Image (cartoon, grey):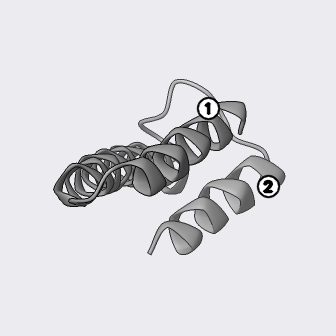
């Protein structure tokens, strides 16, 4: 959260100091691309955990009902 506020402050400050906004556009595109990639990686990890919970014979550990619900909820929110 603090990092997001710092980046927002820096972007706001430089936006008002500079005339062209190409740098801001590039920064926003890079940050959004990284966010999309992290979300996709997180979604793949959650799906792997979810499929492990559904196949009780192949899992090394048993997942509680709460853990299974949380994994399913994480997958739903990521979409």
Q: Image check: 77 left or right of 69? A: left
Residue drawn at x 42%, y 48% is 17
Q: Residue at x 69, y 41 (%)?
A: 63
Between 30 and 10, the one nearer to me in the picture: 10
Quarter of the rendering occupied by the N terminus: top right
Q: How many marks?
A: 2
Q: CA distance from mark 2 to mark 1?
A: 35 Å
Question: In the image, residue 68 lies at what x, y percent?
Answer: 68, 55
Secondary structure state at the residue bearing disc 1: helix
Pick the front one: 31 or 61: 31
Closer-to-camera residue (23/43): 23
- The correct choice, above or below, for 37 with respect to 58 in the image is below
- In front of the other: label 2 or label 1? 1
56 with respect to 31 (left or right): right
Dot 2 lies on which element?
helix
Residue located at (37% from left, 44% from top) = 38
The image quadrant where one finds the C terminus is bottom left
Taking the image as drawn, is residue 68 in sight?
yes
The residue under label 1 is: 3
Q: Which residue is mark 2?
A: 65
């Amino acid at each position: 959260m603090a990092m997001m506020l710092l980046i927002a402050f820096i972007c706001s400050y430089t936006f008002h100091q500079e005339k062209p906004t190409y740098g801001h556009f590039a920064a926003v595109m890079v940050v959004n691309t990284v966010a999309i990639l992290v979300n996709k990686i997180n979604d793949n990890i959650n799906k792997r955990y979810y499929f492990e919970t559904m196949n009780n014979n192949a899992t090394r550990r048993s997942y509680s009902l709460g853990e299974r619900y949380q994994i399913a909820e994480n997958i739903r929110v990521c979409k």
